[in-house]
Image (cartoon, rainbow, N blue to C red):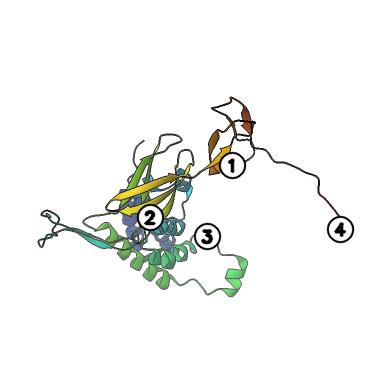
Amino acid sequence: MTKANFRQEARLALHRGRAELETGDDQRLKYAALELRMAMEALTYDRLQAFKAEIPPKEYETWQPRKVMLMLLEIDPNVDKGCTLSMGREEYGVPTKHMKVVGTEDVLDLASLKKHYDALGAHLHMPTLKQIEQGPPFDPQRLRARCEKIAAVIEKVLSSSVFNITLGSFAELPCQRCGTTIRKRIPVGLKVIKAKCFECGAPYVITDKGAGQTLWKALQEKIHCPTDNCDAKIGVWRDEIKPGTWWTCHECGETYEITLGVKKHKTDSTDSS
């Protein structure tokens, strides 16, 4: 599958938005707002694409930039903060004193999205009767100033010498249920985190043991075989403990299924129901 070049799409949208602003026509401001919104969307999707391995596929359907950024912030609290990347050679575990700056990244942060994205969108729809009767009149100078401000933010982001830096500590494991590789970021300061296979949904708990070592625990429950005189224990994943799940005992060969059960309710003389 071809990887979308959202960063280039952001550049093109910014160029079109700038062209609309330069006409000086107030009636063209709505088109400038539309292009700048698309540029913000493209930059946010570009950021999302960098975290693709850490996001459930169903979340790719999320298109609102603010929701995308909130989702990314759950993965990495620093995802909407700029940074400078420097590198240096380390000698036998001793940090180097000579670092070379590789580049600096500016990002489109959550604050900018909250401040500008919806505000621009308000000019892309026909105002309602209530907005016409009670709302302030259209102010082209104010909208133009906002468009110029967000265009400058987008230009700064696109001028970054490096971009989509996603450094971090990660743990990987082939899923014990389907074999798909699970990759999970280990946030700084957290020792125990939950993980789930994006392919089959198998749940795990990861414990950070330090020194680059992690312990993965499959979330399973051991169920004793109901067959008389059979001592076998069956491992059932927690997400499979629901009606319809069945298995065949590896010891006695009997097949069992999880079902809902109903029993008679005991009442007494004080029960008025």
Q: Which residue is mark 2?
A: 44
Amino acid carrying label 2: it is Thr
Q: CA distance from mark 4 to mark 3?
A: 60 Å
Looking at this rendering, what residue extends furthest in the front direction? 229
Q: Which residue is mark 1?
A: 241
Give coordinates of residue 93: x percent, y percent: 15, 55
Q: Element type at marker 3?
A: loop
Q: Earlier in the sequence, mark 4 or mark 3?
A: 3
Q: Which image quarter is the C terminus in?
A: bottom right
Q: Which image quarter is the N terminus in?
A: top left
Q: Earlier in the sequence, mark 4 or mark 1?
A: 1
Q: Earlier in the sequence, mark 3 or mark 1?
A: 3
Quadrant of the rendered structure where residue 73 is? bottom left
For the residue pair 147 and 112, the one nearer the viewer reads as 112
Q: Which residue is mark 4?
A: 271
Give the class, few, some or many, for how many residues have Cα within 10 Å of label 1's Cα (few <14, many ≥20): some
Give coordinates of residue 39: x percent, y percent: 37, 55
All told, the count of numbered labels is: 4
Residue drawn at (81%, 45%) of the image = 264
Q: Earlier in the sequence, mark 1 or mark 2?
A: 2
Amino acid carrying label 4: it is Asp
Which label sits in the foreground, 4 or 3?
4
Give coordinates of residue 229: x percent, y percent: 62, 30
